[in-house]
Amino acid sequence: MAVTALQGVYSKSRHHAMQIPRIRNARRFFTGLLCSFSLATAAQQKELVAYANTLQGTNSEFSLSNGNTHPSTALPFGMHAWSAQTGKNGDGWKYQYKATTIRGFQQTHQCSPWVGDYAVFSLMPVTGKLTVGEEERATAFSHADEIARPDYYKVTFANKITTELSPTERGAHLRFSFPAKQPAYIVLDGYDALSGVQIFPSERKITGYVTNGRFIPKGFRNYFVIVFDQPFEASGAWENTNNRIFADTLSAEGKGVGAFIRFKNGAVVQARVASSYISAQQAELTWQQELKSFTRLEQTRAAAARIWNTLFGRVLVEGGTEKDKATFYSCLFRANLFSHTFFEYNSKGEPYYFSPYDGKIHNGYMYTDNGFWDTFRAQFPLNTILHPTMEGRYMQALLDAQQQCGWLPAWSFPGETGGMLGNHAISLLADAWVKGIRTFNPKQALDAYFHEAMNKGPWGGANGRAGWKEYYQLGYVSFPESHGSTSQTLEYAYDDFCGYQLAKLTGNDFYQYVFGRTMYNYKNQYDSLTGFMRGRKLDGAWLENFDPYEWGGPYTEGNAWHWQWSVFHDVQGLINLMGGNTPFITKLDSVFSAPNKVNVGAYKQTIHEMTEMVNANMGQYAHGNQPVQHMIYLYNYAGQPWKTQAHVRNVMTRLYNAGENGYPGDEDQGQMSSWYVMSAMGFYSVCPGTDQYVIGSPLFPKMTVTLENGKRFVVEARNNSPENVYIQSAVLNGKPWPHNWLRHADIVNGGVLLLEMGNKPATGRGITNEDKPFSLSSR
């Protein structure tokens, strides 16, 4: 934002025409000269959006994830994104860095290859003979001929066709430049389900719909309109089951039905695309709202760059290496992609949406495409800092979704999938309320959560509660009645704390009592003899043949080393269980010193999370998956905050980068990126549902966060360097700050956190009980 603004100011200056001023204006002259020099320097600086590489994490496959991402070209939280497609239609790995051909440019919503995609259609430029099938039309490319940024994607194929792409919130602007004098075709692929197209040659337009997706309601359609700027020389339809072409057909529907257009040889063709879940008419209206005024791709790109530069400018880093800036802004980009907006604007500018839950049209806001098991930890807390208005709308949307399908969302895509475990919508709601985002009825939220906690829904493990009866009767979820039982108990207890917290803050004695009884259930999974959280049978006995290195069984996507620490709300209680600070610290240290071996256990094969932990070579620390990501911040609770500081910096520099191998595991809808962004800021949300963030070690010498309210929170780390990772002293708004935590209000009210950094631990700082972050239990 700052650079863009400065460029605009500087371009209007006329210093070259200025004559030597009279001596009485010398001060003004030299002040102006210095300002002009500063503006010129700023104008030459790299715009922030150029740091973000959307290829980050794309070198992934089924057996190993370096992010499992694709090069999304999108606006923040946009309804649709667009991506180059290297994989087959329906393949979760839609873009793989190792691929050598591209077969299309897709509208996409995919947040994970494990759940696929929905509402997909693609455009592909073809030269020479018309080829429509995805295998036959796939064209060779090189990454050397590829630009991948949030605001702009460009690739030149080996056959010299160039494709460029820039996004709007619900659409995209593409440009296809064909080689001189060579045939020019654009093929629209209807993907892998029922689709339809209509071609309007006189209007240079295609309209249609697609219906693909696994978790969609009955009657779901994504309507699209595509307007080209060049006349059609020929057109027709085709279907991708047998790749049959229907020349001169202007209207068709069926499974995988698409269209093709032929333009004059050597054409440069622009295509402006918008789509809607509501109706074909709304797709046309959205096109008018978002794309009509952009007649050239450069205009759309400039608008997209302005939006990203503004957002990135709100989290402005100073100092540090160019490599660190690239990693930071690449992660900040992905931290602001999900959830997707699911609402649209009518002709009066009012929001409304097609519900992915009941298939009806409703007024208001809706968001989707997010798995809360991943993102309650950091992505949503980051939103409370950067996007409180959106967060407030989102909280009401959660309750609206619950009314429409009978359950709070857990993993929506776009309808409810019930993926993973826990009932973490209550974490989002409690976290928002604690932080002053109070846009919803807390009684309605608690009623919805109570229903969630006392029932099991028809979908996956996080739709209601697997093992809920045992959880209330025994105080834990038993195994083998429920796989992942120990993990479930730990996360249910945390969620119950969030319900308790919301009830307490809103004066609801009934729910405060109900959830206050169960939020300590984590204690029932701790075995003092082995020193680990363990699986238990119905009769209370521990599971036999315990091996802390064994994955699966009572643990979800991890082992006992990983699930030891999921007591976000009562770390002091966990410390007490484990015998005090010394054994607690010893166990934390042991996570890193233990061998990085794997017992595949109930999984019966090596899954990618295991491989990623082994590759990280940090003992049993498995940052590539969520359960252990907060663990390194727990030293702050036990009197050794300097170990948090060292580990945080090590993880940031060792496991993240801006390249195709940029993540140590699945990026997961912004969670992996949000961990990095918050940690680079110098603090992390160990326990959402409280107003505290736990202090780590900031990556940059200075970071300025500009809030929605216009206030600024500055973290300045003097003498910061790759060696000087330890906080020597801290001052918050001019007052000494010995604590290992910050309050949300400290950030959003603006201020300065001044840190002195050094290369040796300050072992006398942050060690009193008052310095420890929040825990339910007494110290």
Image (cartoon, rainbow, N blue to C red):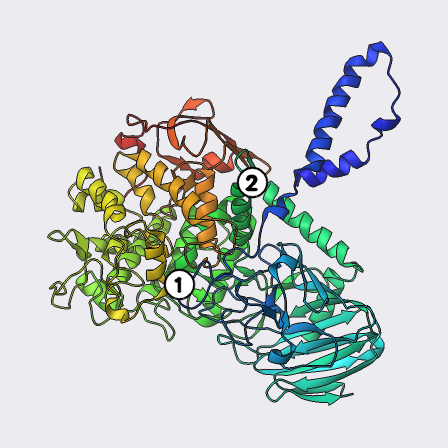
Q: Can I make out residue 432 in this image? A: no
Left or right: 627 with respect to 209? left
Residue 627's quadrant in the figure? bottom left
Query: In the rendered image of this protein, does residue 312 appear above or below residue 406?
Result: above
Spot the residue most to the front.
158
Numbered label attached to residue 119? none
Q: Please tell me which residue is depicted at 33% across the width and 39% down the height of the picture.
A: 644
Identify the secondary structure beneath mark 1. Answer: helix
Q: Please tell me which residue is depicted at 29% across the width and 60% down the height of the picture.
A: 558
Provide the residue designation for mark 2: 322
On-image quarter of the N terminus: top right
Marks 1 and 2 sit apart, C-alpha to C-alpha, by 47 Å
x and y, in percent, of residue 446 in the image: 38, 58
x and y, in percent, of residue 182 in the image: 80, 73
x and y, in percent, of residue 492 in the image: 30, 59
Disc 1 versus disc 2: nearer the observer: 2
Task: Tell me which amino acid carries mark 1.
Answer: Ala
Identify the secondary structure beneath mark 2. Answer: helix
Report the number of numbered marks: 2
Disc with the residue nearer the chain's start (1 vs 2): 2
Provide the residue designation for mark 1: 448
Left or right: 161 with respect to 60? right
x and y, in percent, of residue 250 in the image: 76, 85
**Which residue is nearer to you in this view: 534 or 408?**
534
Left or right: 463 with respect to 36? left
Residue 149's quadrant in the figure? bottom right
On-image quarter of the C terminus: top left
Mark 1 neighbour density, 10 Å: few (under 14) some (14–19) many (20 or more): many
